[in-house]
Image (spheres, rainbow, N blue to C red):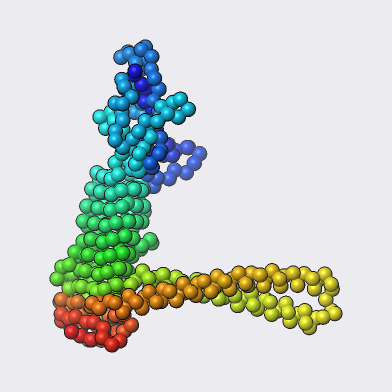
Amino acid sequence: MPYRVILLFGKDPGNRPDSRETVDHYRSNIAKPVTAGQPLARLYPLTAEESAPSAAPDSADKLTIQDKTEIISPMVKLSEDDGQLVIISKENGFPALENQRIVIHKNLTIDGDINFHTGNIDCPGDLLVKGSIMSGFKVRAENLTVTGSIENAEIECRGNLICGGGIVACKDYPLTCGANLWCKYIENSRIEAKKNIFIGGSSLHSFLRAGSDIILCHSLAVLVGGKSEAGHSLYSGTLGAKWATPTEIVLGCEPFLAKKLDNHRLKLEKLEMELDELKERVDQINTFLQHEDGKTTRHDAKSLQEERELVESKLSYIEQKHNTALTKLNELKNQIEKFKRTNFDSNLHITEHLFSGIYLTIKDAETRIEEESPSIVMQEQNDEIVTQ
């Protein structure tokens, strides 16, 4: 039996602008991803007259098939919804119509730049961009490969990130990577990679945070300016510049735990300020009731007593939150100390030149490099930084 197929996927219908509304030029202009269980198409049986060749030609979102199994692929299934045939996705990904069959692609390829033509991209699988990611756009993917450069974009990569060019001006939002990151160079950016950061060239005035190592691969590579944090070691050809450009290096401390610790300290400080304010208000009420005994009306006294009860109730709640936050803070401190104790190979490796003006921390030892030196390896021993 022939069927008319109405496709339920394609470009985001929200891209059809209403003349009365502001157009969002960053909205995705590619097929939106679907999730398992989402309807992809509806099938309607056709009469012999409707399926005749003289009938109106198919549009972009409609097609005619002679048998309902023609359009089914292993990634979708046929279901019945209230007597109507519906094609349902069995997987997460990007739907497409290929050779009259509906398929689901977990990975996505963009043949060119991510710009106003494509809009923002949210890919549930791997994403290959055969171009660059332009300023202002948001990209999320499992593993991300960019043949060009990334400029002032908001990037969230859950796995590995490979950038054939440079990463430039990504500082409004940190570029986050759930595993390893490879790129040609980095300038004025904030990078966070849970494992390693590999840089083919140089890093200039950037904030780098790596769970394991930061490795500038070329012997002539330079890291200068900004702050670099690595759970283990940092390798570079040259570190710093002859003008003693402020450059901070922190090694041997798990940087993401340290970030959590800093955020938790801020949270604890806010709770302590709130506690102090509540305690001060309770003291004020008590003092007023004691010294104004007989001078305040019964109504005013009752209002103050009710306020005190409310403040004391909130004080008890905030104290519980404070105790929980304090416990979490101590847990984070213990985790960081354990990481330091078991981390024996944290070193600073410089193969060409180490300039002065470097602030270096390895575990709990700190120093400021005051003199230039050629190739050098530095590590922590007994809370002091020594040269190998």
Q: Is residue 61 visible?
A: yes
Q: Left of 65 or right of it: where is 371?
A: left
Pick whichever, 250 or 382, lies toward us. 382
Res 250 → quadrant: bottom left
Q: In the rendered image, is residue 249 in sight?
A: no
Q: Quadrant of the C terminus?
A: bottom left
Instruction: Report the front residue among 167 and 343.
Output: 343
Asked if 130 appears above or below 371 in the picture, the reply is above
Q: Where, by quadrant of the figure, is residue 171 drawn?
A: bottom left
Q: Position of residue 225 (x, y in %)?
A: 29, 73
Q: Which quadrant of the view contains residue 238?
A: bottom left
- Quadrant for the N terminus, please: top left
Provide residue 304's location: percent of width, then percent of height: 75, 72
Taking the spot 32% from the left edge, 51% from the top edge, the residue there is 141
Measured as percent of width and height from the top left, residue 2 is found at: 34, 19
- Note whether 368 is above or below 136 in the view shown: below
The count of marks equals 0
Percent across and percent down for residue 292 are 80, 81
Query: Residue drawn at (85%, 79%), measured in percent from left and top?
Result: 294
Does 15 sit left or right of 352 as displayed?
right
Q: Which residue appears at 84% of the width and 72% of the height? A: 298
Q: Is residue 267 above or below residue 166?
A: below
Residue shown at the point (20%, 73%) measured from the top left:
235
Left or right: residue 326 compared with residue 384? right
**Front in this rendered view, residue 385 or 70:** 70
